[in-house]
Image (spheres, rainbow, N blue to C red):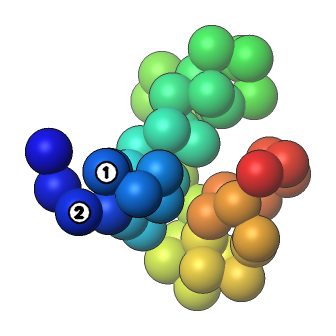
Amino acid sequence: MTSSAANGSMSQTDVVISGVKRMLSSRRLKPGDRLPIEKDLAAEPAGLPGLAP
């Protein structure tokens, strides 16, 4: 377990992966859709547009 996982925080990579999974499961992102650009991902508090933290 990494220190970030031990203290409850997630790496930015893990936040993005989790957000993409949520977008897929909620059908807001469908297989074959393009992912948002990095600039847009970084601009959102949760790491992904339209996702609450």
Give the mark count. Answer: 2
- Residue 45, by quadrant, is bottom right
- Residue 48, by quadrant, is bottom right
- Residue 2, by quadrant, is bottom left
Q: Where is residue 53 in the image (x, y as percent from the top left)?
A: 77, 51
Give the residue pinned by disc 1. Answer: 6
| Residues at discs 2 and 1 in contact (Cβ within 8 Å) | yes
Query: Which residue is at a point 71% across and 17% down the rendered structure image?
Result: 27
Local SS, label 1: helix
Residue at the limit of the structure toward the left, as seen here: 1
Residue 14: image tag: none
Report whether 20 appears left or right of 51: left
Query: Which residue is at a point 70% across and 60% down the rendered structure image?
Result: 46
Query: Which residue is at a point 66% across and 76% down the rendered structure image?
Result: 40
Q: Position of residue 20 (x, y in %)?
A: 53, 39
Report whether 27 appears left or right of 12: right
Q: Nearer the viewer, residue 38 or 34?
A: 38
Q: Which of 20 and 34 is in front in this view?
A: 20
Give the residue pinned by disc 2. Answer: 3
- Distance between the alpha carbons at the discs numbered 2 and 1: 5 Å
Residue at the limit of the structure toward the front, as seen here: 7
Q: Nearer the viewer, residue 37 or 15?
A: 15
